[in-house]
């Protein structure tokens, strides 16, 4: 028996109505979804730490999530693991004509932009049934990633600035609107305007071919390193950050920036 078949049997046993695990039996797609997202992040974390042992373990946890969802779908008569695997196989074959296509397609090699064109053709087929070019963008995506995808998908219809200057100017416009909301101190309005500003920043990142999530990851890491350096500097003097006013802290922050 292959390892994947063994895993599928283990999952089926865990979901067995009589002899299975009580916790596993009571789960549904909605209750398991947060665990699936968490496992994906743990895979990314192992990669970021260059932890190959951890990555192997986390990929196993993520695979278990796929098997879990497929088992529940099979019980509901919707689809099973084999259909999941067949679906992704067909998709990869379809999207890589330079590898799996006919002789002429293979001879042309990898054509720049072909992946996105094939995906766009698939979406047009789906959109004909669903009704909007924005359909199919997962609601549960992290907000930065979903904003990026919404902007990119809308741009396929021509609804986009021709260059990054328009996206940058829109940020100034949204900043002005946020300033007006701040003057009125209306929480709901401030929240809305801040959201608009963040969305515009993501659009600028898209025009600059910058991944906004990775840009923010880098900014988080930089802030953490500098703050920890500032803490260490203050600790060496036997003091605490709370002992200083904001001007003094800013001066210490500038010193920490030169070190971290």
Image: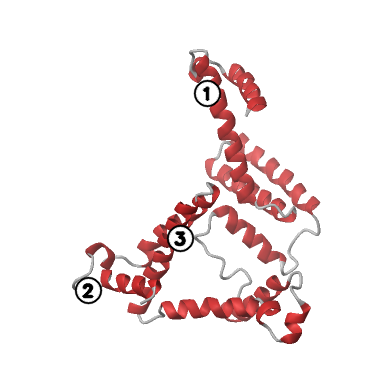
Question: Which of the pair 100/28 is nearer the observer?
Answer: 100
| Residue furthest left as drawn | 18
Q: At 67% from the left edge and 48% from the top edge, which residue is drawn?
A: 201
> Which disc is residue 207 wearing?
none
Alpha carbon separation for disc pair 2 and 3: 28 Å
Q: CA distance from mark 1 to mark 2?
A: 55 Å
Q: Earlier in the sequence, mark 1 or mark 2?
A: 2
For the residue pair 100 and 111, the one nearer the viewer reads as 100
Quadrant position of the C terminus in the picture:
top right
Q: Which of the marked residues, 2 or 3, is nearer the chain's N terminus?
A: 2
Where in the figure is residue 68, as x and y percent of width and height? 37, 68
3D distance between C-alphas at marks 1 and 3 = 36 Å
In the rendering, at what x and y percent does residue 91 appear? Answer: 58, 77
* Location of residue 70 in the rendering, given as x and y in whole percent from the top left corner: 40, 73
Residue 134 position (above or below residue 241) = below
For label 2, the residue is: 17
Kindly identify the residue that appears in the image at 58 percent across and 39 percent down: 221
> Disc 1 vs disc 3: Cβ atoms closer than 8 Å?
no
- Eye-nearest disc, 1 or 3: 3
State the image coordinates of residue 152 (x, y, percent, origin top left).
68, 62
First reached walking from the N terminus: tag 1 or tag 3: 3
Where 173 sits versus 40, above or below?
A: above
Q: Residue at x 53, y 22 (%)?
A: 232
**In the rendered view, does 182 fall on the left or right side of 82?**
right
The structure residue drawn at horizontal position 60% and vertical position 50%, both measured from the top left corner, is 213
Q: Secondary structure at mark 1?
A: helix
Q: Name the disc covering residue 231, or none.
A: 1
Q: Is residue 36 above or below residue 237?
A: below
């Amino acid at each position: 028996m292959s390892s994947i078949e063994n895993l599928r049997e283990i999952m089926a046993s865990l979901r067995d109505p009589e002899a299975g695990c009580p916790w596993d039996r009571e789960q549904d797609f909605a209750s398991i979804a947060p665990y699936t997202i968490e496992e994906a992040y743990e895979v990314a974390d192992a990669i970021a730490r260059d932890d190959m042992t951890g990555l192997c373990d986390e990929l196993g946890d993520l695979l278990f999530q796929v098997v879990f969802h497929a088992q529940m779908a099979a019980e509901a008569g919707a689809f099973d693991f084999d259909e999941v695997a067949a679906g992704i196989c067909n998709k990869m074959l379809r999207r890589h004509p330079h590898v799996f296509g006919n002789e002429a397609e293979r001879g042309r090699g990898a054509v720049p932009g072909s992946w996105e064109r094939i995906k766009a053709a698939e979406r047009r087929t789906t959109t004909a049934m669903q009704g909007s070019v924005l359909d199919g963008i997962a609601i549960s995506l992290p907000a930065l990633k979903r904003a990026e995808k919404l902007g990119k998908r809308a741009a396929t219809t021509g609804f986009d600035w021709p260059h990054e200057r328009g996206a940058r100017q829109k940020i100034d416009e949204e900043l002005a609107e946020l300033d007006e909301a701040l003057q009125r101190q209306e929480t709901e309005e401030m929240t809305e305007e801040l959201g608009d500003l963040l969305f515009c920043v993501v659009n600028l990142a898209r025009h600059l071919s910058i991944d906004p999530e990775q840009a923010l990851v880098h900014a988080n890491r930089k802030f953490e390193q500098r703050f920890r350096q500032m803490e260490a500097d203050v600790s060496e003097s036997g003091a605490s950050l709370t002992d200083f006013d904001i001007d003094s802290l800013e001066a210490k922050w500038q010193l920490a920036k030169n070190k971290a």
